[in-house]
């Protein structure tokens, strides 16, 4: 793919050893970037004329300050203004979309009325120190231990909701993290994330290494008074990608919800004609197998111990780029145990250099009385401008 | 009579020797041009323009390479993709997504895709090494490209070679062994793609064309243009630079 590209570049060169002057380094000490998105959501159950609408104006600002090669300070804020029928009609809308936050309350509702919610949340606020093999980060940060793309049982610090596609950055967590690179292909990662009470503390140690063309990881620690251990890998079978993750939780004394196990496998492949296919499966021991509240399913953040609504779920998606600026995908999620089907189509169009237009659908069906009945449909139209 | 026969034999021998030398030279020339690719390191900054009849998109990126096995690319523009990093180590590839601060390992089959929606195909690029081993080479003429004297070399793939082209013509500059023009023919012997290299300058202490155009001949108004803004060659880069650990640090 890209390596290739350099061959063309290099092919133009002669072999003499004439290494030369520095390429112009543009090290900005302070950078700001982000985007503004407008999202229009229309939802209905059976009758498309009976639409519930929700509008969201979403701005993100990423501030980064790098005084030298060792320190990086980050502050990233999402400002969201929601309005439309659903703000009014959904009880507890504000607390649902603003989330529970971490140890520090970095969320503020500027306006929370019957018809509008204006919230600002800092989901990254961290200081990072890198020196040689050490990498230490303090503060609110994203700790991605997950490997897979749909379900990530190894994400014990920061679960994310696959349906919440508009939150590309995914939530952060308040934590202290120390990474140490043992060799260029292996590292140790120690993370402690305090909860609001000590019962909610999460801490774990991970070992990560690359061998035989695979990335492997294994971890163990404490998750909200549960013992937890897990492992994952990312590699390939011939030309197809092959990833897996498994995490186990065992409650300590006083744990009421029992032991938990979540495991996922996925295979993805890119055909010569550009069609990309992914197939994935999830086993989630604590899955309740009932799809009652779609809004909850699509907007809330789940706990790492119970990462999805169903016990057995299959996912597959096919994606194709009709041109470099026009891409479409069709995903489907089917719960074998929950008798539910979710259809996820999307179309993405880059209308100009930094402008993207998306049309995304989410349809939920449940098997009742021998047939599939719609539980809810949502259509999203999103315009994004990045800067 | 004797003398005449002698001259004739000598001429034939000479011709034979000459043509042998000539065909060897064709392979040698290609090898020399292609050898420039191997065992080297580079740090380059470039702009890629994808042109279509109704639209144009521009990306800029910075890349590091070490031989054929290792490369790292960071996208620097447009803003919405800036900070995205690709890493290749031998046969493994990874993608760093800056907004979620995560490394995703990509399936090897992604290597055989068109590169980021450009007109550069895998065969133009990844299999560049096969330009020596997978073809028979023959010098079929001389001509001027970019005002430089070039050998025109015809390359016919060997029967067993996994090459999608029926023929590739390559123009190699006689002075600096630069590949200045390539023509790719399909199985019906129709010209499909032209790669035209121009704007030869000294960059990073080397003479090289800084503008590369890939033109699909049968698709009007469509092309991919690569322009090098800066380049540094053959400065030692450790293999340890090309690690997933380093993906989030490069800029």
Image (spheres, coloured by chain):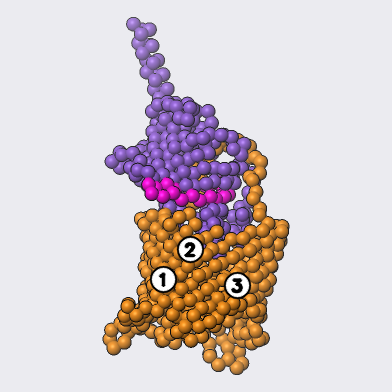
Q: Chain of mark 2?
A: A
Please tell me which residue is depicted at 40% across the width and 15% down the height of the picture: B10
Residue B166 lies left or right of residue A26; in this view the side is left
Furthest toward the top, the residue is B1
Mark 3 and mark 2: Cα distance apart in space:
20 Å
Chain at tag 3: A
Closer to the eye: label 3 or 2: 2
Give above or below for A228 relative to B134: below
Viewer-proximal residue, B92 or B86? B86
Q: Is residue B61 magenta?
A: yes
User: Chain under label 1?
Assistant: A
Q: Which residues are magenta?
A: B50-71
- Residue A231, placed above or below residue B39: below
- Percent coordinates x, y for residue B15 in the rendering: 39, 20
Q: Which residue is mark 2?
A: A384
| Separation (CA) of disc 1 from disc 3 | 24 Å
Who is closer to the viewer here, B13 or A73?
A73
- Check disc 3 and report the residue beneath it: A123
Q: Which mark is residue A380?
A: 1
Q: Report which colour depicts chain B.
A: purple
Query: Which mark sits nearer the N-terminus, 3 or 2?
Result: 3
Residue A282 percent coordinates (x, y): 44, 77
């Amino acid at each position: 793919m890209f390596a290739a590209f350099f061959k063309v570049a290099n092919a133009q060169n002669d072999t003499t050893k004439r290494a030369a002057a520095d390429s112009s380094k543009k090290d900005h000490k302070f950078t700001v970037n982000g985007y503004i998105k407008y999202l229009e959501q229309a939802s209905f159950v059976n009758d498309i004329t009976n639409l519930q609408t929700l509008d969201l104006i979403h701005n993100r600002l990423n501030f980064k300050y790098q005084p030298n090669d060792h320190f990086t300070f980050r502050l990233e804020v999402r400002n969201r203004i929601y309005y439309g029928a659903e703000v009014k009609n959904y009880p507890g809308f504000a607390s649902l979309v603003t989330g529970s936050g971490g140890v520090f309350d970095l969320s503020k509702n500027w306006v929370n009325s019957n018809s509008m919610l204006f919230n600002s949340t800092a989901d990254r606020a961290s200081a990072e120190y890198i020196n040689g093999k050490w990498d230490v980060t303090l503060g609110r940060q994203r700790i991605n231990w997950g490997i897979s793309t749909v379900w990530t049982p190894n994400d014990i610090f920061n679960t994310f909701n696959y349906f919440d596609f508009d939150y590309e950055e995914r939530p952060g967590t308040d934590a202290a993290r120390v990474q140490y690179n043992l060799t260029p292909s292996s590292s140790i990662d120690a993370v402690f994330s305090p909860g609001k009470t000590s019962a909610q503390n999460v801490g774990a140690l991970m070992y990560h290494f690359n061998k035989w063309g695979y990335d492997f990881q294994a971890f163990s620690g404490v998750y909200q008074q549960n013992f937890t251990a897990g492992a994952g890998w990312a590699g390939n079978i011939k030309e197809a990608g092959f990833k897996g993750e498994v995490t186990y939780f065992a409650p300590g004394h006083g744990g009421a919800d029992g032991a938990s196990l979540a495991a996922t496998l996925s295979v993805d492949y890119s055909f010569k004609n550009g069609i990309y296919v992914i197939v994935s499966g999830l086993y989630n021991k604590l899955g309740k197998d009932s799809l009652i509240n779609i809004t909850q399913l699509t907007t809330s953040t789940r706990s790492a111990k119970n990462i999805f609504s169903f016990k057995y779920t299959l996912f597959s998606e096919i994606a194709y780029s009709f041109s470099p600026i026009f891409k479409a995908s069709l995903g489907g999620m089917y719960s074998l145990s929950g008798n539910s089907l979710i259809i996820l189509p999307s179309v993405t169009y880059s209308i100009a250099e930094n402008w993207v237009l998306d049309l995304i659908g989410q349809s939920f069906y449940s098997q009742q009385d021998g047939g599939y009945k719609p539980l809810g449909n949502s259509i999203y139209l999103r315009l994004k401008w990045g800067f | 009579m004797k003398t005449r026969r002698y001259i004739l034999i000598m001429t034939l021998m000479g011709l034979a020797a000459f043509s042998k030398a000539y065909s060897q030279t064709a392979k040698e020339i290609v090898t020399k041009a292609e050898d420039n690719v191997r065992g080297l390191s580079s740090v380059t900054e470039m702009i890629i323009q994808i042109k279509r009849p109704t639209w144009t998109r521009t990306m800029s990126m910075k890349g590091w390479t070490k031989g054929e096995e290792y490369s790292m690319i960071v996208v620097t523009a447009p803003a919405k993709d800036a900070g995205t990093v690709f890493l290749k180590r031998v046969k493994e590839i990874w993608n760093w997504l800056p907004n979620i601060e995560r490394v995703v390992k990509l399936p090897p089959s992604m290597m055989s895709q068109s590169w980021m929606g450009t007109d550069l195909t895998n065969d133009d690029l990844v299999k560049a090494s096969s330009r020596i081993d997978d073809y028979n080479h023959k010098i079929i003429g001389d001509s001027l490209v970019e005002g430089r004297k070039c050998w025109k070399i015809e390359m016919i793939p060997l029967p067993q070679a996994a090459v999608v082209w029926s023929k590739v013509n390559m123009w190699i500059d006689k002075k600096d062994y630069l590949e200045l023009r390539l023509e790719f023919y399909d199985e019906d012997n129709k010209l499909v793609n032209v790669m035209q290299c121009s704007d030869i300058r000294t960059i990073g202490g080397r003479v090289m064309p800084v503008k590369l155009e890939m033109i699909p001949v049968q698709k009007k108004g469509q092309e991919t243009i690569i322009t090098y803004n800066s380049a540094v060659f053959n400065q030692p880069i450790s293999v340890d630079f090309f690690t997933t650990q380093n993906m989030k640090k490069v800029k």
